[in-house]
Image (cartoon, rainbow, N blue to C red):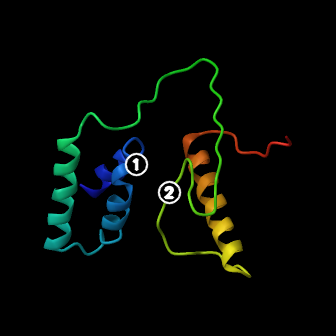
Amino acid sequence: MVGCLLYLTATRLDIMYAASLLSRFMNEPSELHFQATKIVLRYVRGCLDLGIWFRKAENLSLYGFIDSDWGAISWISKKQEVVAQSTAEAEYVVAVVAAVNQLTWLGFKVGTDSR
């Protein structure tokens, strides 16, 4: 069930935090985790009309902007894997890595714009 919730996070950003938190306990789930998963599934069932609609386009241009606190395309919660010299640098590193990972997962060519 948690795998299905993780699949839904591609179009349902409102459940991303709950799904990522539940996925941390997939190795040893308890009854409490099962009940929490059922609550999230009831929430999804109650608001089926919400989500992001992806339409086919001939000329698609995707522009992503990131901030150290908020990612326009990506928002994740996980343990920090990079050692930085300052807190600000750590926030920038995590934000950039998260955005590039999401863009790569979406299948877009990642590069820099010289403008």
Task: Say above or below: 7 vs 56.
Answer: below
Q: Which quarter of the figure is the C terminus placed in?
A: top right
**Residue wearing tag 1:** 13
Viewed as shown, does residue 114 lie left or right of 106?
right
Depth check, front residue: 64 or 80: 64
Please give the name of the residue rendered at 18% of the width and 43% of the height, measured from the top-left corner. Answer: 45
The furthest residue to the top: 58
Please give the name of the residue rendered at 63% of the width and 34% of the height, measured from the top-left corner. Answer: 62
Few, some or many C-alpha atoms within 10 Å of disc 1 (few <14, some 14-19, many ≥20)? some
Which residue type carries mark 2? Trp
Viewed as shown, does residue 105 lie left or right of 108?
left
Please give the name of the residue rendered at 47% of the width and 24% of the height, measured from the top-left corner. Answer: 55
Depth check, front residue: 6 or 53: 53
- Mark 2 or 1, nearer chain start: 1
**Residue 114 falls in image quadrant:** top right
Q: Position of residue 16 (x, y in %)?
A: 38, 55
**Residue 86 falls in image quadrant:** bottom right
Viewed as shown, does residue 104 lie left or right of 51?
right
Viewed as shown, does residue 42 lie left or right of 63?
left
Which residue type carries mark 1? Leu
**Residue wearing tag 2:** 75
Q: Can residue 83 be seen in this snapshot?
A: no
Please give the name of the residue rendered at 24% of the width and 37% of the height, measured from the top-left corner. Answer: 48
What is the number of the mark on residue 50? none
Element type at mark 2? loop
Q: Position of residue 3 (x, y in %)?
A: 31, 54
Q: Which quarter of the figure is the N terminus placed in?
A: bottom left
The furthest residue to the right: 114
Task: Say above or below: 47 vs 71.
Answer: above
Q: Can residue 88 be seen in this snapshot?
A: yes
